[in-house]
Image (tube, rainbow, N blue to C red):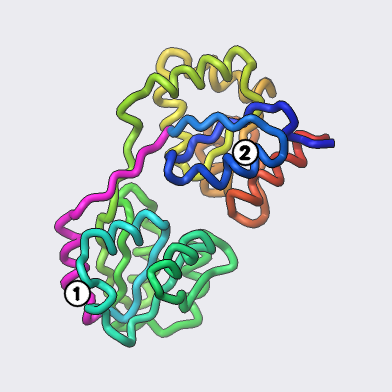
Amino acid sequence: MNGFKGKVIGITRPVERSQAAVDIVQKNGGIPLVVPTLELEAFASKSLMDLCNRAGELDWLIFTSPASLESLFKYCEGFREKLNPQCQVAVIGPRTERVLNDYGIKADVVPEDYTAEGLLEEFQKIDLNRKKVGVPRTFKARDVLPEGLKKMGATVYLAEAYKSTKPHDTSRVQLLVDEIIQGKVDAVTFTSPLTVTNLFEMAGDKRIELIDSFKEGKVLAAAIGPITQKPLEELEIPSIAPPKYTVKDMLMQLKEEMSD
């Protein structure tokens, strides 16, 4: 049985990151409903420019999302040429690795577990004592990675590469909330904790009704991994997550769940 056939699948990630999910849902007979609960805004922060100026002295660069990578290369002119030739690069997962490859750079480290914890596990095998590590990212990200790197003796240069904000136009999110409550949406996918928290915050006075729709099984919640599941668990909302933390694996797991 085709689990997505005729089913409406809500996709809450930013528009520029949603095409792969849309393609998978459509290919499997579903109806993708792209309603971002998160917007990514790249900008040339002071800390990003500082990291750019330190390019020649870095021992490691760590990218935890395509957005951090794209922002750095956009605002730091000639960054690749300025980079210390011995500098090694780590990425959080295969999607970020693909974007890195587009810039002509190969990743030295890609963890099996696509999380900050997974990256730290890989770095346990590497001597980071007195090494200079650049980490461009959003400042809303968890502190697990930089704190873990510091404990290993690294000097960490955090740089704000982009901001994660709520959508400026909330009308589409309000419509999604109404359609979930009315039972017109079969499942909603979440790819970061902020995609979860922003949805429920923007629901306003319909928040309790929205939570109940998930709890009562009117709509399924699918998360990309355990970090994204946490805010759902805090709301006592059941969710599914794949063993491998990718959009494709999440959707295949959801498809399987909806086929039962």
Q: Quadrant of the C terminus?
A: top right
Along the viewing direction, whichever of 243 and 237 lies nearer the viewer: 243
Q: Amino acid at mark 2?
A: Ala
> Circle 2 sits on which residue?
222
Please state the horizontal and vertical placement of residue 173, each as a whole percent of the image. Answer: 44, 23
Residue 187 percent coordinates (x, y): 64, 30
* Mark 2 element type: strand
Q: Is residue 104 above or below residue 202?
A: below
Q: Residue at x 62, y 33 (%)?
A: 221
**Above/below status of 187 relative to 151:** above
Q: Amino acid at mark 1?
A: Arg
What crowding class fits label 2: few (fewer than 14 Cα within 10 Å), some (14-19), or many (20 or more)? many
Residue 44 picture location, percent across and down: 19, 54
**Which mark is first along the chain, 1 or 2?**
1
Residue 54: assigned label: 1
Q: Which stretch is magenta?
A: 37-57
Tell me, for residue 189, which label it has, or none. Answer: none
Front-most of residues 113 and 148: 113
